[in-house]
Image (cartoon, rainbow, N blue to C red):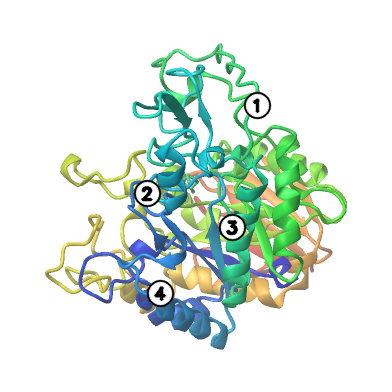
Amino acid sequence: MWWRRGVVYEVYPRSFQDTDGDGVGDLRGVAGRIQYLARLGVDAIWLTPFYASPMRDFGYDISDHCAVDPSFGTLEDFDALVAAAHAAGLRVVLDFVPNHTSDRHPWFRESRASRESAKRDWYIWRDGNPPNNWIAVFGGSAWQWDEATGQSHYHAYLPEQPDLNWRNPEVRAAMLAVLGFWKARGVDGFRVDAMRQVLKDPQLRDNPAAESWSGAPDRYDSLIPRFTTDLDEVQEVVAAIRAEIGDAHLFMAEVTAPIERLVRYYGTAGEGAHLPFNFHLLWVDWRPEAIADLVERYEAALPDGAWPNWVLGNHDQPRVASRVGAGQARAAAMLLLTLRGTPTLYYGDELGLVDVDVPPSRVVDPDGRDPERSPMPWTGSPGRGFCADGVEPWLPFGDPALNVAEQESDPRSMLALHRRLLALRRSSADLLEGAYETIAAGGGVLVYRRGAGTAVSLNLTSQPAVAPVSGSVVMTTGLDGREGEVIEGSLLLRPGEGAITAAG
Ligand code: NOJ
């Protein structure tokens, strides 16, 4: 179970490294950056979808689960990437998207062809236009009327992403076979997309109105998705996926849910996900009291044997440095990498990247997520080392001063901080395995103990603050020479500063 000690790094392949001059990242590009990732000190890369796709949802609309989209390369490129990662000691985790396919997938084409099609029941077709009030995550009715056959199909996301019918055993078998295909190619695990949504109410009951909602009526949040997400029966699908993935491979699941519902996805007796994503740090109030409360509630809710995990950023959310502000980005990194459990680090967050302004003419995502998907800046040159100078990247870049090369040469950079934190974590039994205990949460500081001998103090304000700890300083977020300082009961922290101390 390597993933208990591991750190997962999310690579969004479109935005990591272009090698073929089209302004879109590709698999050869990721392979060429493996040494950077190994040196950073992460243990696994999670690759978001690179499968054949019309790219309406940038790869989450798959038209062939077992083929590489030409914009990303070939299956041989994929094999070479896995080989390069493994040679460098990195695991490879793939995205598995069970809930829906592209409307260009041959299964859907066949399903749509006629009501009598052998694959009609592979998707969710119903009479009525629309059959009920369900709303898609990206807004508007979740039903798309098909004139030719006189029925509507259900789509939790875009109309071009029809939902598969997981109640049909042939669908289950066909989708589970996809896992087998990639396992045989040597991958180390899967991140399963939209896990909560794979089953919907067979009676098609209307979702209730969200009483607090005052926005437009066709928005997803206007209804409580009671009959479209997180049905109890979803756990049967989770168990089927777990049985296929097994124990030698990692099963991470995308589950956006309150803590008490989230932890159910661990299953019982080895039937659930190894790591149902814990997204709660993405939304928590950036105050010591709120963060301590979140960590304690999560720790308390974990079932026996369940291993925790934490996420601070991903390709669906504003960047952490934009959410909490540049002055808090270092403390946020220390938090992510010192809480108990497996962290997922989003590409570029190790540089402190912020959301990039995308002018209306360059907007491409149907759900406003372009700003956090700007390509990785490797250098300060016009193409940022992501693509050749003169090539137009698929999304605009941000501030040229924020780049890997610049930070490589600065021993106090965000990149240096991440390397230091990752190295310390790897060598510290307390940080890897030690229990979590809050020492203080108030006065702007969050202080917690990990194991018997390690404490983490974070100043979550823009004022100096005092943390009630004793011991000697192991490292601080400023990387500016406080190591070895002996603290007797009160550690003075500068604005946004974090410190790891060893018990004296
Ligand atoms: C979650 C993915 O992270 C997101 O990018 C995608 O749009 C939806 N699931 C639909 O697949």
Kindly report which numbered mark, 4 or 3, lies closer to the viewer in this rendering. Answer: 3
Image quarter hosting the N terminus: bottom right
Direction from residue 24 to residue 7 in the image, left or right: right
Residue 104's disc is: 2
Q: Which residue is mark 3?
A: 191
Which sits in the foreground, 282 or 441? 282
Q: Amino acid at mark 3?
A: Arg
Q: CA distance from mark 1 to mark 3?
A: 26 Å
Label 3 Cα neighbours within 10 Å, binned few <14 / some 14-19 / many ≥20: many
Q: Quick one: SS at disc 3?
A: strand
Q: Position of residue 456 (x, y in %)?
A: 68, 58
Q: Which residue is mark 4?
A: 30
Q: Amino acid at mark 2?
A: Arg
Residue 202's disc is: 1
Direction from residue 320 to residue 234 in the image, left or right: right
Q: Position of residue 139 (x, y in %)?
A: 40, 27
Q: CA distance from mark 4 to mark 2?
A: 27 Å
Residue 180's disc is: none
The answer to whether mark 3 is within 8 Å of ligand 1 is no
Which sits in the foreground, 290 or 72? 72
Q: Quick one: SS at disc 4?
A: helix
Q: Earlier in the sequence, mark 2 or mark 1?
A: 2
Tags 3 and 2 touching, CB below 8 Å? no
Q: Amino acid at mark 1?
A: Pro
Q: Quick one: SS at disc 2?
A: loop
Tags 2 and 1 touching, CB below 8 Å? no
Residue at the spot 49% in from the left edge and 24% down from the top edge: 221
Residue at the spot 55% in from the left edge and 42% down from the top edge: 122
Q: Position of residue 452 (x, y in %)?
A: 84, 64
